[in-house]
Image: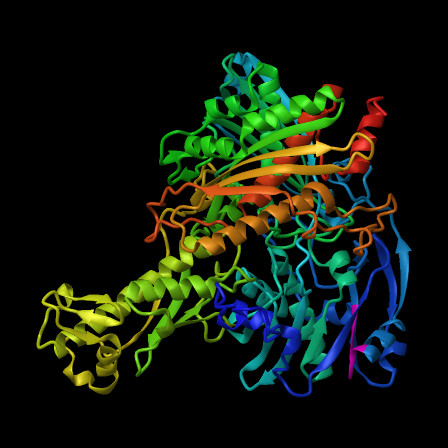
Amino acid sequence: MPEGAENWVPSRDEDAALITGRGAFLDDLDPLPGTLVAAVVRSTRPHARLRSVDLSRARAYPGVAAVIGPEEVRAALRPFPLSTGAAMPYLPTGVDKVRFVGEPIAVVVASDRYIAEDAAELVAVDYDELGAVTAARAALEPDAPLLHDDAGSNVATDRTFAFGPVEERFRDAAHVVTGSYDFPRYSSVPMECYSVIAHWTEGNDGPSVESWANFHGPFSMVPVMAGALGIPTSRVRLHVPADIGGSFGIKAGIYPYVVLMALASKHAGTPVRWTEDRVEHLMASSTGADRAMTFSAAVDADGTVTALRTDLIDNVGAYLRPPEPSTLYRCYGNITGPYRIGAVEIRARAAVTNTMPTGLNRGFGGQQLYFGLERLMDAVAAATGLDVIEVRRRNLVTSFPHETATGGVYDSGDYAAALDLVVKNADLAELERRREAARAEGAFYGIGTALVVDPSGTNIGYVGLATPAEDRKPGRDKSGSTEHVRMSVDLQGAVTVLLGSVPQGQGHATVARKVAAQRLGLPLSQVRAVVDMDTATTPWTVSSGSYSSRFAPLVTSAVVAAADTIASTVKAAAGTMLEGAAPGELTLADGKVIHPDGRSVAFRHAAGLVHWDPAALPDGVPARLYSEAEFSPRETKAATADDRINSSLCYGFVAEIIAVRIDPETLEIAIDRVSSVHDAGTVLDQTLLEGQVYGALVHGLGGAAYEEFTHAESGQPTAATFLDYLCPTSAEAGFDLRTDHVVTPSPLTPLGAKGCGEGSSMSFPVAYANAVADALAPHGIDITRLPLHGEALHQLLTEKGNS
């Protein structure tokens, strides 16, 4: 043991169990006796009609308890409800067709995984192969293979929005700058893949399903699951263990397997467990949407952007799987980024293709948006002859609150200060000297900048934008960013905070415990936080979950509300013990309830009075030391009739500068320096903020330089193992990193906190692209897509005749 290790105290409550092998991951748990094991039979074809699926040999295999296939799924399950009216029904298996390689076809339940896998190989599938399409633009061509016959096209949704005098400003512009860009399909690669235990039971009051899953939410998926199973939401009970091995968004897509394993359990008559292997995960779980997009800016002679046009086409895979088309709309309110652009036109489309369905991926919607917007800002600088930083500075929002053309309301910020700080920390003048020296030597060196508004506390009302206003049913709007917590005090004065946020490793328990302790004037040792989720007993709302950086602005606000309710009761009890002292003049500090004259009682003694001597409480004071509190900000309303919406509650900010050096012989891209400045409002925990920044940076690096799901012309995936799907490691993240922050507290949350979990995952990819573009600019090469690595650069240089 290293010297001093015995005195080491982890900086997060969660760390000690994880680093000593005591984590409670689902594969470690065995909650039900007699649980059998499932294996999934998957399509080997990207697009085919199912002529037949013969399950007979698998069913006869020794040790097999049940086998279900398309007939059982068709008979028992309803298609998952979709957020649009597209005739593209989605079930957890293919029933008439398979539409991507890896799509489930059948499930084999057996006494162990070995038998289940062996029997799965005996399922005989007869395919009638069809043509395949894997790219969004190609899927929109008139002769493209049609995935869903009844839909009549591969367009899952197509909406156009306009705000302000767009036509007029483009007509009068000194410059019209246009660029077309492609953002890649990549994923999250959590340590633990999908895992489910499901148990179907029949009771006197009908069927019910109890399941365990490493499912971070959002819990809007619970009614989706109940609808598919044909049972009330109250009959679906979901448990999520404290540790889920990371998600970063991707485990919101696990719900089809919860439904599928529930049906398998019904047929097997036992609980059923299924754990995904890595090949299954890379082939058939979920990814972020790849986007083909065109951005145009109307620009005055002085570099002011007066209007913006966007044409966004998301490839959502084989099905418009809920919560898609969220990727198109999550950043709707901040689509103009940190810039004062008063006129906006948006066309938002989603296309289905013969690839795995898409969903949430860290920074979802923001990665795609800012790749187009910040590449466009570099193009505006080139068109006007301005420096890339100066053109951004001239267009920044400078006063708050600021309302965007699309309805977003930026609550607070100081974008200019953050930009100044990121430039200072980068030592930009030194980087520019390095660039000059490199170019003089015939080498490649570039500097890239990106500025992004970081939305947090998502308003789920944005899902309504996929439906035209005239088709939205009156009284059926969606809105809100509500979160609940439950807080209680036991007989010894110990406080327990029960969270429904379902963390993926961000340290929610650490911060909730700290906030509760500070609010109640208690030592940390007197407060504990619980994050195990059970939908039957844990407080939650339909919008609950760990996504879109909800915890800091929303959950902590609910913790504050619960603590304040507890505090009022404790003060009333202490007032009795202090011979009638008025509760309003008492304060909580150092584990005591203190009177201004110096008299005090211990918090635990005051709490004990509520439990042991409730008749002593003043009239009207409840003998209750638990509180279920909610935070439901009214700033997150439903979309208006003219399609404007504040799509998040709070908006942070990120300014990033990246310098890269490219080896002229190997074309290997090396990151020379990264300067990153974040505004997340009030910083609740500096260590956790830094962890989120570093994690988001590396996540962004993956999409910028390494990760991409690719397909052959036939539609077969060509990146289904880690031999082909490359991820950054600590070796690739060892660059000169300089992080900092500014603080502009949000006026909308009790603590002034905003989210910080996604920022650099949105800014890093485009800052990296801008740096590479700057390095290659002397050779006349534009950067319009990611990822960027030596092979991609070789192709670009070859096409330009520079090799």
Residue 351 visible within the image: yes
Camera-nearest residue between 492 and 436: 436
Q: Quadrant of residue 62?
A: bottom right
Task: Residue at 74% x, 22% y: name it.
Answer: 441
What's the colour scheme? rainbow
Q: Which residues are magenta?
A: 106-113
Q: Is residue 331 a member of the stretch shown in magenta?
A: no
Q: Position of residue 340 (x, y in %)?
A: 45, 27
Vertically, is 797 above or below 185?
above
> Quick check: 64 left or right of 438?
right
Q: Position of residue 555 (x, y in %)?
A: 41, 59
Q: Quadrant of residue 613?
A: bottom left
Q: Position of residue 649 (x, y in %)?
A: 42, 47
Quadrant into which the C terminus falls: top right
Task: Residue at 63% x, 45% y: name it.
Answer: 700
Q: Position of residue 430 (x, y in %)?
A: 57, 27
Main SS of residues in magenta? strand
Vertically, is 405 above or below 578?
above
Residue 496 visible within the image: no
> Quick check: 792 left or right of 482?
right
Task: Residue at 66% x, 72% y: name it.
Answer: 196
| Count of marks overlaid on the render | 0
Task: Residue at 49% x, 62% y: name it.
Answer: 507
Quadrant into which the N terminus falls: bottom right
